Structure formats: C-alpha cells, structure tokens
Amino acid sequence: MRWLCFWQPPCVRRRVIVNLQHDSTEAFEGVLWSYRGGWLTLRDVSGLKAGQAPAKIPGDLVIHRSNVAFTQVLP
C-alpha cells in the first residue's frame, strides 16, 4: 500500500484558468504548479482580459484562494 504524505488537488500540474473575485473581466491562464496553505502557484502564465490578446507574464504567479472566484481546468 502506498502512503501519501500530503494531499493535492487533482488539477495540480494541469493547465487552468483562474478567475478572480474582484474583477470578472480579468483572469489568468497557466499551469497550476502547487497549492499550499491556501496559496496557488501558477507557472507559464498569461493574463487574460476581456477584449484583449493574452499577455505573457514572466516568472511564477502566486494567488491566495480568497481572491479566486473559481478555477477552470482545461482539457
């Protein structure tokens, strides 16, 4: 039997779109790299804004779950 030392959501290491609570016209698309202590870390991130082309964001993006309205897992 295999023991897991921590729990991780099934969408970790998958491409997701994170929609923010404060602005329904703004979101981020990237790979959900980790989820620890209420913080989501995204890599290979693009900023999405209604009516504009996606903007590449250098580095990692860290978002607290209290700022997230919902997360979409891409196929």
Image: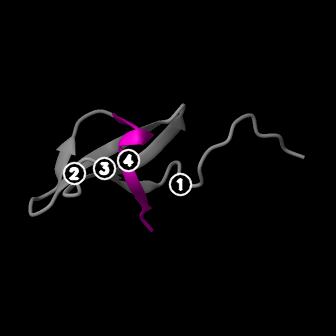
Mark 4 touches mark 3? (CB < 8 Å): yes
Q: Is residue 64 magenta?
A: yes
Label 1, on which residue?
A: 11
* Callout 2 secondary element: loop
Residue at the left extreme of this rendering: 51
* Distance in Å between CA atoms under marks 4 and 3: 5 Å
* Callout 1 secondary element: loop
**What residue is drawn where x is 84% and y is 44%?**
2
Amino acid on which disc 1 is placed: Cys
Mark 3 touches mark 2? (CB < 8 Å): yes
Which badge, 4 or 1, comes first in the chain's sequence?
A: 1
Residue 13 in the image, given as x and y percentages of width and height: 50, 49
Amino acid on which disc 2 is placed: Asp
For the record, the magenta segment spans 61-75
* Distance in Å between CA atoms under marks 3 and 2: 6 Å
Q: Quadrant of residue 61?
A: top left
Label 4, on which residue?
A: 68
**What residue is drawn where x is 45% and y is 46%?**
32
* Distance in Å between CA atoms under marks 4 and 2: 10 Å
